[in-house]
Amino acid sequence: MDKKFIAGGALTGLLLSAGIAGMVSAQSAATATGLSEEQVIAIALAEVPGEVQEVELERHRGQQVYEVEILAADGSEMEVEIAAESGDVLKVKADGEDCDKHDDDEEEDA
């Protein structure tokens, strides 16, 4: 009976450790970007005025990038990509639009 109690305690300890490690890594990722979500939103809205629908932090080609989806004043859905480390605007495009690389391929076929 003591073995079950000890095993249960050990398992609980492992689960708590994993949870704490996950929280610390999420906080580290947020601070590693150098920008707060509020700063990212301000940068995006300076490019495309409207209502922010979603903000995501993703990795593109080895670089952390914020993708901000905005419902523009004219009703169009736009996406602004911002470099997480510098705050530089990388791309502004209509939401759902393919990347520029595919557009070039289509022009060559025409």
Image (cartoon, rainbow, N blue to C red):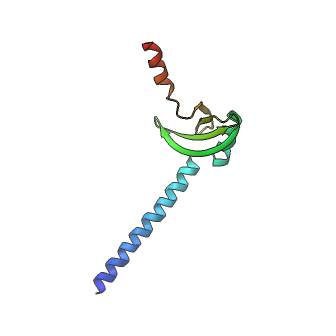
Instruction: Give the quarter of the image for residue 66.
Output: top right
- Res. 6 visible in picture: yes
Q: Residue furthest bottom?
A: 1
* Residue 94 as seen in the image, left or right of residue 110: right
Does 21 appear above or below 60?
Answer: below
- Res. 84 visible in picture: no
Residue 82 image position (x, y, % from top left): 59, 37
Which residue is rendered at x = 61% and y = 36% of the image?
77
Residue 38 image position (x, y, % from top left): 67, 48
Report the number of discs. 0
Which residue is rendered at x = 42% and y = 14% of the image?
109
The quadrant of the picture occupied by the C terminus is top left
Instruction: Give the quarter of the image for residue 56.
Output: top right
Which residue is rendered at x = 52% and y = 55% of the image?
26
Does 12 appear above or below 44?
Answer: below
* Residue 8 as seen in the image, left or right of residue 77: left
Which residue is rendered at x = 42% and y = 64% of the image?
18
Residue 94 image position (x, y, % from top left): 58, 31
The quadrant of the picture occupied by the N terminus is bottom left
Q: Residue furthest front?
A: 75
Residue 53 image position (x, y, % from top left): 62, 45
Does 1 appear above or below 110?
Answer: below
* Residue 6 as seen in the image, left or right of residue 70: left
